[in-house]
Amino acid sequence: MKLVVQIPCHNEEAVIAETIREIPRQIPGVDQVEVIVIDDGSTDQSANLAQAAGADRVIRSETQMGLAHCFRTGIETALGLGADLIVNTDGDHQYPGSEIPRLLEPILKARAELSVGERRLSEMPAYPRFKLFLQRLGSWFVGKLAGVEVRDAASGFRAFSREAALKLSVLGKFSYTIETLIEAGRNQMPIAWVPVRVNPQPGRRSRLYQSLGQYLTRSVETMIRTFARYEPLRIFLAIGSAVFLGGLGIGIWFLYYFFTGGGKGHVQILILAAVLLIIGFQTMLIGLLADLIASNRKMLEELIYRLRKLEAGTKTPSDAP
């Protein structure tokens, strides 16, 4: 049983070495542990320090490609290295390496294919209460979209079985956390939540977003886009129905006025009703077309999964990028 720990990293020279050194190399149920660092265009010494700290492989990008790209690169590399288990942890030393065995336990015991570290944010006095509220609200909403219980949607501390890694497809550019949860839930993948400790990070600003507003905007955009890939008919049908019923209501009101008020004037109301009826009907038709495309996408996902499985099975560690 081989474990590959992947660490996305961008300008983390102050903590990347400590993050790597904390990763246990001896874990019950695991025969081999390998650590890879995906350096996302760092302008400091993160990559060199990671290699000096004992990283088995450092993958460097000349420019900053984003967290989602780093995650995809790490997954593909880990599969190419023959990983049976993959753990993703942050390069900012937020998650203690000592928690990795607990994170792996549900997968090793065949209770889950995806295991997510649930941060105990409510136990941290310095964590802003407003951000805690938004985190809980966002997790609840992601859970509704995914169709499963979600306790900490933003946690990047995750473990994947080989099958889970082969099935997941991250298409977004911002982050992978929300997208993978919705995808796992919609594909009925067993998910386990493991309460974990986090290291305090006083005064540290996020490398992922510039402001809370930007993070919320991109997160909501990711939620809608990912959910629409799996349930386009529900989204377009709801929008189309609302517009169509609005036009129908205005049309009925116009007819009532027409027959009771002499039938003169207010032609613009009739035009508005007709426009809304047409737009609503077209939106519902678009939903039907999108649903047919989604059905084809599911077949493509299955084909991609089989191709990945075949490719990962034929690669040797020396073939991995």
Image: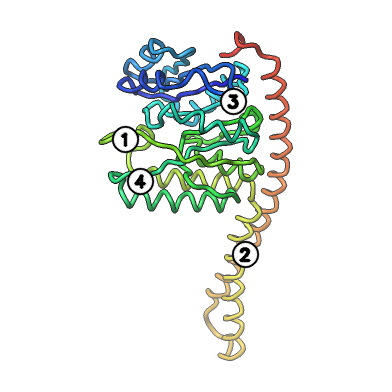
Compared across the picture, whether 256 is left or right of 156 comes to right
**Contact flag, marks 3 and 1 (Cβ < 8 Å):** no
Please state the horizontal and vertical placement of residue 72, each as a whole percent of the image: 54, 27
Where, quadrant-wise, is the N terminus in this rendering?
Answer: top right
Q: Can you give x and y, in whole percent of width and height, for residue 238 in the image?
A: 60, 61
Amino acid at the residue labelled 2: Ser
Of pointers 4 and 1, the one earlier in the residue sequence: 4
Q: Spatial distance from mark 4 to mark 1, Cα to Cα?
A: 12 Å
Q: Secondary structure at mark 2?
A: helix
Looking at the picture, which amino acid does disc 1 mark?
Pro
Q: Which residue is mark 2?
A: 241
Tell me the crowding category of disc 3: few under 14, some 14 to 19, or many 20 or more residues within 10 angstroms, Cα based: many
Classed neighbour count for the residue bearing mark 1: other residues with Cα under 10 Å, few (<14), some (14–19), many (≥20): few
Residue closer to the observer: 283 or 61? 61
Tell me how far mark 2 sits from mark 3, CA to CA. Answer: 45 Å
Q: Which residue is mark 4?
A: 123
Tell me if label 2 and label 3 are in contact, CB under 8 Å. no
Give the distance between the C-alpha atoms of the residues marked 2 and 1, in whole angstroms.
48 Å
> Of the residues under marks 2 and 1, which one precedes in the sequence?
1
17, above or below 260, in the image: above
Amino acid residing under circle 3: Leu
Give the quarter of the image for residue 110.
top right
- Badge 1 is on which residue? 200
- Residue at x 59% of width, y 35% of height: 106
- Where, by quadrant of the figure, is residue 179 drawn? top right
Q: Looking at the image, is mark 3 or mark 4 nearer the viewer?
A: 4
Q: Which residue, given by chain and number where applicable, does mark 3 sit on?
A: 85
In the image, which disc is placed on residue 246? none
Gap between marks 3 and 1 measured at Cα: 27 Å
Q: Is residue 243 above or below residue 82?
A: below
In the displayed orientation, state which residue is furthest to the top: 318
